[in-house]
Image (tube, rainbow, N blue to C red):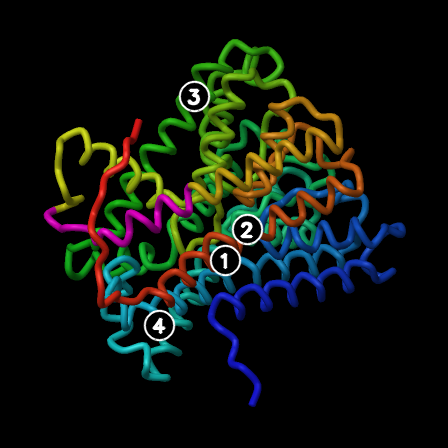
Amino acid sequence: MPRRLSTPQLIVFGFLALMVLGTGLLKLPVSTEHSISWIDAMFVSVSAGSVTGLSTVDFPTTFTTFGAVVVMVLVQLGGLGIMTVTTMAVLFAGQRLGFRNLIAVRESIESVDSPRNTLRLLLQIARITFAVELLAAVALSVAFIRGGMGFGEGIFQGVFHAVMGFCNAGLVNLEAGSFIPYAGNWLVVGTLSLAIILGGLGFPVLVDLYHYRKDRRLTVHSRLVLITSAVLLLVGVASVAAMEWSNTGTLGGQPLSTRLAMSVFQGVTARTAGFYTVSYPEMRDPTLVVQTLLMFVGTAPTSTGGGIKVTTLALVVLIVVAQIRGQDRITLFWRTLPQSLVARALSVLALASLLVLLSTLALMVSDGLALLPALFEVTSAFGTVGLSLDVTPNLSTFGKILVSVVMFLGRVGPITFVVALAARQRTLHYKYPEEEIAIG
């Protein structure tokens, strides 16, 4: 009798199949204006399926409308699939492990063992996704049509970038290859920023906010995500404004309204979206370091974004605060967090740091890159962001494969690791004597 696949294996194989299918479709003659190599088709497929946004080819001049639609579908399936699969996986695990509060979905689901409630949950995910994308598509279409695009082209570009925005994928299909021409257009910048933020909050938080109108209550998870996300957004916006305000290569010399719009957009997009309205190679090193840290952290669990997740960062901070105060437990909003979460958060942080460090070193050796460009590229891939210091188009074959692997692991790695740990958790019926070791 064939062995049943575990949840982590289903996640990995599911996304592998999606990316393999995407590679084949993007290699078709109908998908491109000119022939591209298999490695480039694979890279773009992985980038789209993992909702990253890095591209080894010039996207607008390489792919036809059919190819752009294929990429859009890959991004939609990657973004919606991740939210669906991970929410369901953790909910199923939560039946036994009791961390339903971590991803609480409120009254929308009383028992995930019920097919009716499972279907209701999936429909809620789909409704939220398409509602946000529809509103964003309308606003962007209006902006593009007003900007001189034809009616049909404006609508297509509006829909395409609405999907990219909510799914936090940084692929751009505009002729300019970026949103630099729209740097001061608050309708475009504001719409994309809002879509990116909502996609990065995660489905449990969005459902929580929806029900807040009736019960005026948020779960601990939702409050932690909202507070941490708000702090990181303020850090991102303030850092860009403070360090780039006088830089003539980025914000310097622009009108006040445009400078503010650029600061807001780049403070938001670094969280895993990957769009840009400034030239990143001309940014100052301190700004790039902050952007790298934001990319590493990413967004919330069960969202369309990547990174180690804001809850991991928040939990690490809470651990440090508890140690400084001499507390033997972690409390938050009049609740005690399980000790198992501590080991899980530190494990995710350690594995992510190790992956980024080793991949950065490998890319420096293989492609002869300096530390910051290599670290920025790898962190962007791990955080499924899509920003680059013009490194991606010039990657070697090994570099393309390496970055593709990092994008894939950045999307499914932390998810499968946490779910695997959850599934394997068991109580030992014996205990060895304790003995301390020196720390610090």
Q: Where does the image place residue 59, in percent across and percent down from the top left?
A: 74, 44
Kind of element beneath mark 1: helix
Residues under numbered marks 1 and 2 in contact, where contact means CB atoms less than 8 Å apart: yes
Q: Which residue is mark 2?
A: 162
| Alpha carbon distance from label 4 to label 3 | 40 Å
Crowd rating for badge 4 (residues with CA inside 10 Å; few <14, some 14–19, many 20+):
some
Q: Is residue 359 left or right of residue 227?
A: right
Q: Earlier in the sequence, mark 3 or mark 1?
A: 1
Is residue 348 part of the magenta span, yes or no?
yes
Q: Nearer the viewer, mark 4 or mark 3?
A: 4
Report the amino acid beneath label 1: Leu
Q: Which mark is residue 134?
A: 1
Q: Which residues are magenta?
A: 334-349
Report the amino acid beneath label 3: Ser
Q: Where does the image place residue 61, in percent across and percent down from the top left?
A: 80, 43
Q: Is residue 151 left or right of residue 125?
A: right
Crowd rating for badge 1 (residues with CA inside 10 Å; few <14, some 14–19, many 20+):
some
Residue placed furthest toward the bottom: 1
Q: Earlier in the sequence, mark 2 or mark 4?
A: 4
| Alpha carbon distance from label 2 to label 3 | 26 Å
Report the amino acid beneath label 2: Ala
Q: Earlier in the sequence, mark 2 or mark 3?
A: 2
Q: Residue at x 52, y 76 (%)?
A: 5
Residue placed furthest toward the left: 334
Kind of element beneath mark 4: helix
Q: Residue at x 45, y 57 (%)?
A: 417
Residues under numbered marks 2 and 4 in contact, where contact means CB atoms less than 8 Å apart: no
Q: Earlier in the sequence, mark 1 or mark 4?
A: 4
Q: Where does the image place residue 434, in percent across and percent down from the top left?
A: 20, 47
Q: Which residue is mark 3?
A: 239
